Image: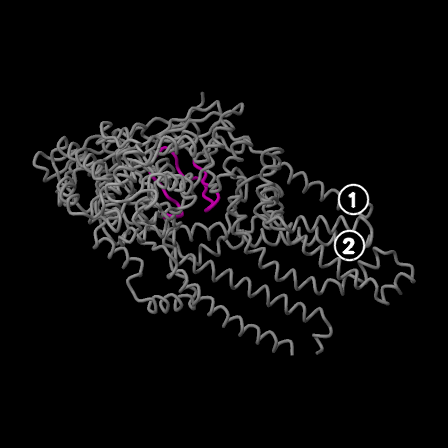
């Protein structure tokens, strides 16, 4: 049953990705802006324009271009970036770890902050503390991630300069990375200076991305906890002598967390989408930052590669969330 | 905390210490270290091919690593580069170039005339993707004797040697490039410039180390880190927090604020980048009175003072001070009454305004949209009702290349070699994909200047064309941009009119 669900989701994923590939291919070509026009020198003749157009393959029909591109994609060749002059697959795979590391770090922060706020709010339900949690999470939610970023740059970059403003790592650090997961690799290989530098660079962008999600988690999880905390089995736990915090963490959390998990999954995809602006602000060398450059320069193969990868990430995350929900929820698992 | 054991406490403390220590602001200068927060990331390490090669902002970084055929001074004048002597033969059928002796590549190999010939030949081949191929293909059949190279002129290009100090005019190492290939060169580029690439983190930074074997004066800073900080707010924060020693291209409001702070200084340098309004030969712009009225109605001084905090130089032609064909006797003054009178001759007034669309970018250049808004306001006072259409710069290039721009379109034009062919010439010569005004009178006047062999006559010809354009109102030049640079007060920064910010031109006070 579970295997069938997985296979069915995989098939849907492939169809979805093909749809995204078609839409993105058509959209980037009908959108205003021609990459050839952007690189024309002042004295270019009609012949020069024709030569450049042919050089980048834009002289072929849209359908021909699509089939050449999708044929390459099937074989793992996403084309060559016009501006960076390197294979798109190499470029996006080199930047993906940076974005994943930032996103997961942001997710951890969001879950930690949101989870603690939810437990405190549920523990003190009906008191001014709960109202404070509601008020704070409402306020945090109303401020978009890039504004948090600007605020952090001002606070921790300029007024109290304790965190790094740009990049992923202190350029002075000497370290031969085996992967592009600089924080994780630094930790695993015992280079705490490298890991520390990576986390110090990630902290502000990660916090900017995390805070709105943390507020959402706090609101939803608290509400779910409150609903669970009036159930008979939690009352029974109290009767057995467990403290309110123990009741929340041991009994209530498991059931209250399930709906939150779905929300976190969906919101995590939005969080990854948010990296585009936040990475730009902090000059963080991830996919989002590269996506903006690709759009500005009308680097069509690179835009296609990045969007397709983002789409694959979104679909994979949603699938994982669905599957984990199925695994965690006994009613669905045995249904 | 009460559940934390000793190991957990020690682990957490160690991690927190590492985090805090690494997060401390970097003291940018550390015995020869210089950190620059730069506004554009390096896209490719081949400065001769692809779009990056024609991105003017990237030239500063390329110039730290590579040398051009011909050098250029801060005031736009030309100087010996890898070539120490150059010129056309009397009959303009041949060129000669003398290659500097004793230059080495950053791998220690000597730079030879073969490298120069190979670089020029490669640049002329369309399949390499050199966007300036049309210039380099005008010479060929190279011969070498000692350090001297001669070549045949296939098509006479008066500004050929000026182009040798401009976009894509970099010399690359023949043997090294051929042995590692284009991908290998991207991974480990070498040039003959004052700095070599030490580490490169795409999209984040490049760390440069001084090349001991450099043929010119040794740069003062042994290590230069150029951080790619595209967001202006973050660049300001970088220099304000001490994380960077120098930054550039920030809003003028921030520039004024930063240079007022202790420990920071700045320069606002007029550069070879101008703001202008292209007029297209369509609709109401076919009426000379409308064109001239649109120009006379714009108070450029006011716009510069109010919107650019005074950082700009008003212009009446597409040539700026320092360009070979700049002529300060050509002026189109702010004169709203004359604008009204001209419009009245064509039957227009504030009650019956002439209507057209003006296109502009928003945020591509400092206050571009705001400037157009102000201009539209000034136009309204004299009887011109313009509707603003905002587009992206990529759309502008596409519309311009296909001659579909609106009757008026705001744009910026750069020309860091100061030759009139690359400003008035290509922007106003109808057959060029960059020209917007396509009438035959201008084609007849500009066309012969592209091949005029007498330099004095050529420059005078462009001055005459500039005067004619101003009289006919074929374009509305607005202002010369000013580039703000902020740096630590204990540094000296040599500013280049070309807009380059060269690490080798930075010294300690």
- For the record, the magenta segment spans B185-208
Q: Which subunit holds the residue at mark 1?
A: B
Tell me the number on the disc at residue B317: none
Q: Residues within 10 Å of mark 2 (few under 14, many from 20)?
A: many
Q: Quadrant of residue B425?
A: top left
Task: Report helix, strand or loop for mark 2.
Answer: helix
- B97 displayed left or right of A316: left
Tags 1 and 2 both on a single chain: no
Image: A323 above or below B25: below
Residue A220 in the image, given as x and y percentages of width and height? 71, 59
Task: Report helix, strand or loop for mark 1.
Answer: helix
Residue A10 visible, this angle: yes
Q: CA distance from mark 1 to mark 2?
A: 27 Å
Who is closer to the viewer here, A139 or B77? A139
- B284 displayed left or right of B395: left
Residue B430 in the image, given as x and y percentages of width and height? 20, 48
Residue at the spot 23% in from the left edge and 51% down from the top edge: B125
Image: B76 above or below A96: above
Q: Which subunit holds the residue at mark 2?
A: A
Image: B163 above or below B3: above
Task: Based on the picture, tell me whether residue B188 belongs to the magenta stretch.
Answer: yes
Front of the two marks 1 and 2: 2
Residue at the spot 54% in from the left edge and 39% down from the top edge: A170
Who is closer to the viewer here, B333 or B131? B333
Residue wearing tag 2: A119
Q: In this view, which residue lies farthest toward the left? A: B91
Question: Contact (CB < 8 A) between labels 1 and 2?
Answer: no
């Amino acid at each position: 049953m579970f295997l069938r669900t997985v296979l069915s989701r995989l098939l849907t994923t492939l169809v979805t990705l093909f749809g995204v590939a078609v839409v993105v291919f058509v959209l980037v070509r009908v959108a205003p802006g021609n990459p050839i026009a952007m690189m024309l020198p002042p004295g270019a003749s009609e012949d020069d324009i024709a030569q450049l157009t042919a050089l980048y393959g834009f002289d072929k029909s849209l359908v021909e271009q699509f089939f050449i591109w999708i044929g390459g994609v099937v074989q793992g060749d996403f084309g060559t970036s016009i501006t960076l002059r390197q294979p798109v697959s190499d470029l996006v795979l080199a930047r993906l770890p940076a974005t994943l590391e930032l996103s997961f770090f942001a997710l951890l922060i969001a879950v930690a902050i949101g989870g603690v706020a939810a437990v405190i709010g549920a523990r003190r339900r009906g008191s001014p503390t709960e109202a404070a949690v509601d008020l704070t999470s409402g306020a945090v939610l109303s401020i978009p991630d890039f504004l948090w970023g600007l605020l952090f740059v001002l606070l921790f970059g300029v007024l109290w300069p304790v965190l790094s403003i740009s990049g992923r790592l202190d350029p002075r650090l000497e370290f031969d990375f085996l992967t592009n997961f600089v924080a994780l690799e630094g930790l695993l290989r015992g280079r705490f200076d490298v890991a520390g530098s990576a986390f110090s660079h990630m902290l502000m962008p990660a916090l900017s991305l995390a805070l709105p999600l943390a507020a959402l988690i706090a609101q939803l999880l608290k509400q779910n906890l409150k609903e669970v905390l009036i159930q008979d089995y939690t009352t029974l736990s109290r009767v057995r002598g467990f403290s309110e915090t123990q009741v929340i963490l041991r009994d209530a959390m498991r059931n209250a967390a399930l709906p939150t998990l779905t929300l976190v999954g969906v919101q995590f995809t939005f969080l990854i989408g948010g990296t585009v602006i936040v990475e730009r602000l902090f000059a963080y060398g991830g996919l989002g930052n590269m996506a903006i450059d690709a759009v500005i320069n009308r680097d069509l193969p690179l835009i296609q590669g990045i969007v397709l990868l983002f789409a694959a990430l979104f679909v994979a995350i949603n699938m994982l969330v669905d599957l984990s929900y199925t695994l965690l929820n006994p009613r669905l698992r045995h249904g | 905390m009460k559940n934390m054991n000793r190991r957990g406490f020690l682990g957490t403390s160690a991690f927190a210490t590492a985090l805090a220590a690494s997060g401390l602001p970097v003291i940018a200068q550390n015995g020869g270290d210089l950190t620059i927060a730069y506004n554009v990331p390096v896209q490719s390490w081949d400065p001769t091919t692809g779009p990056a090669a024609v991105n003017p902002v990237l030239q500063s970084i390329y110039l730290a690593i590579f040398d051009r055929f011909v050098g250029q001074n801060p005031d736009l004048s030309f100087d010996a580069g890898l070539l120490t002597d150059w010129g056309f033969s009397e009959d303009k059928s041949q060129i000669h170039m003398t290659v500097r002796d004793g230059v080495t590549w950053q791998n220690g190999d000597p730079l030879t005339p073969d490298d120069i010939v190979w670089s020029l030949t490669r640049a002329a081949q369309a399949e390499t993707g050199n966007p300036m191929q049309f210039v380099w293909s005008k010479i060929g059949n190279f011969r070498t004797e000692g350090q001297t190279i001669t070549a045949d002129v296939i098509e006479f290009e008066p500004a050929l040697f000026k182009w040798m100090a401009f976009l894509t005019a970099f010399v690359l190492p023949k043997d090294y490039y051929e042995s590692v290939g284009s991908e290998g060169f991207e991974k480990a580029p070498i040039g003959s410039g004052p700095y070599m690439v030490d580490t490169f983190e795409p999209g984040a930074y490049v760390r440069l180390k001084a090349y001991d074997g450099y043929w010119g004066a040794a740069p003062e800073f042994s290590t230069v880190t150029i951080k790619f900080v595209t967001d202006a707010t973050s660049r300001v924060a970088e220099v304000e927090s001490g994380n960077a020693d120098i930054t550039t291209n920030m809003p003028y409001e921030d520039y004024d604020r930063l240079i007022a702070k202790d420990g920071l200084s700045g320069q606002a340098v007029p550069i070879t980048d101008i703001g202008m309004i292209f007029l297209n030969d369509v609709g109401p712009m076919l009426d000379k009175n409308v064109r001239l009225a649109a120009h006379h109605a714009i108070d450029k001084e006011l716009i510069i003072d109010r919107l650019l905090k005074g950082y700009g130089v008003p212009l009446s032609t597409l040539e700026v001070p320092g360009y070979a064909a700049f002529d300060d006797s050509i002026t189109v003054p702010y004169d709203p009454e004359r604008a009204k009178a001209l419009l009245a001759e064509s039957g227009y007034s504030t009650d019956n305004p002439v209507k057209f669309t003006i296109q502009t970018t928003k945020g591509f250049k400092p206050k571009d949209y705001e400037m157009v808004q102000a201009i539209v306001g000034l136009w309204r006072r004299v009887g011109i009702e313009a509707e603003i259409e905002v587009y992206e710069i990529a759309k502008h290039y596409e519309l311009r290349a296909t001659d579909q721009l609106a009757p008026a379109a705001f744009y910026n034009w750069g020309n860091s070699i100061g030759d009139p062919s690359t400003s008035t010439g290509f922007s106003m010569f109808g057959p060029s994909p960059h020209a917007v005004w396509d009438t035959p009178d201008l084609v007849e006047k500009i066309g012969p200047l592209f091949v005029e062999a007498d330099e004095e006559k050529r420059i005078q010809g462009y001055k005459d064309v500039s005067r004619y354009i101003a009289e006919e109102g074929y374009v509305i030049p607005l202002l010369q941009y000013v580039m703000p640079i902020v740096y630590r007060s204990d540094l000296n920064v040599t500013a280049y009119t070309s807009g380059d910010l060269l690490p080798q031109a930075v010294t300690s006070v």
